[in-house]
Image: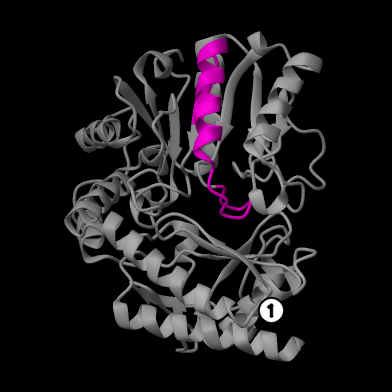
Amino acid sequence: MNNADIAIRRDNTIARGVGMMTQIYADRAENAEIWDVEGNRYIDFAAGIAVVNTGHRHPKVIAAVHEQLGRFTHTCHQVVPYENYIRLGERLNEAVPGDFDKKTVFVTTGAEAVENAIKVARAATGRQAVIAFGGGFHGRTFMGMALTGKVQPYKAGFGTMMPDVYHVPFPVDLHDVSTTDAMTAINGLFKSDLDPARVAAIIFEPVQGEGGFYPAPAELVQNIRALCDQHGIVMIADEVQTGFARTGSMFAMSRYDVAADLTTMAKGLAGGLPLAAVTGKAEIMDAANPGGLGGTYGGNPLGVAAAHAVLDVIEEEDLCARANELGSRLKQRLQAIRADVPEIADIRGPGFMIACEFNTADGSAPNADFANAVRAEALTRNLILLTCGTYGNVVRFLAPITVQDAIFAEALDILEASINAVKGAKA
């Protein structure tokens, strides 16, 4: 087999709407490395979009899944329940920020977690409307699309979105949008279009993922909390991409002095197996009637077993501290490169959720061409990178937090060479 032949088969078989960042087809992977079907080795700075924070095939995760395979793979928890589902709920109830009693429900994907958080908020409040932020990403299901603050490629061509969803600007200093602007927009909604007594929830990402890795300012999070308390609105933190040590703490909301009512999570939870969850205030989570939450595969036993192992690995290997160390080293290297590359407009992010944003050399406009050229050049040098951002001008770095020092250093050398090569080609 080779990549080109498989690509032809893929084009003839798989729906065009399934986008692809590369044309390399994986054969095997280990920690921060992937080998394709032709035997080429790549350093993975995508981690399945922040899914394998504990690395590809971490031995403890593999052992946990193998042990569970020897017992059973599926019963549907709603039919024949199992103890490790409950125990994982207990661990998440303890880990999610917030000094209050919590309960959890398990589902399969991040989009499902978001959908269920909205369902819970509506059931708890008896209200319908939801406020989200421009640039936010909350999934590809219909409510997820409606909440997502980006049209291309997520909403284009899919018709009318779910009603009663309102967007306001997300604060980004680089784009001259402040927390005051965001709060003014919310208060403007309340004056012109939306009675706050109809609002069920405000949802936000503590660090916007697809939107460009913009951290939510502390002032914004505090203001959202105050607004929710004032009007009886449910505050939802979407931690699908930020969770499980990625930002240097188990959850990004730990960096703030207020807690969300509901927290959605997925991606890094189960080390590569599909598992997602909503954890939140017990009285809010209990608002839905029995049978109103869940799903056939929600809380699959293999995913639950993997998640227990992931939580153990994060603690035993101190991956929160490791994320902060790796992120600091990456930022330092990018800052050194920036001295000779004026196209680098910003370097940001907590922990090991780092982004590099590119503008034109004079700083006058976003430069998606430069960002994409860096991604493409790095791939020719066997480093997998991802881009993101409303303008497509951001390179995001999501390597496994378990990446070995030698491989990390190798990747940084490739990154610098790639940026310099693009800079030279455009000079």
- Percent x, y for residue 350? 44, 54
Circle 1: element type: helix
Which region shows up in magenta?
208-236
Looking at the image, residue 163 sits to the left or right of residue 66; the answer is right
- Which residue is at 61% across, 53% downward? 210
- Which residue is at 32% across, 46% downward? 250
Is residue 205 in view?
Answer: yes
Is residue 277 placed above or below 200 in the rendered structure?
Answer: below
- Which residue is at 57% across, 11% downward? 231
Q: Toward the viewer: 86 or 338?
A: 338
Is residue 67 placed above or below 334 in the rendered structure?
Answer: above
- Which residue is at 44% across, 19% downward? 291
| Quarter of the image where the C terminus is located | bottom right
Looking at the image, residue 145 sits to the left or right of residue 259; the answer is right
Looking at the image, residue 291 sits to the left or right of residue 358; the answer is left
The quadrant holding residue 145 is top right
223 in the magenta segment: yes
Looking at the image, residue 17 sits to the left or right of residue 315; the answer is right
Residue at which label 1 appears: 373
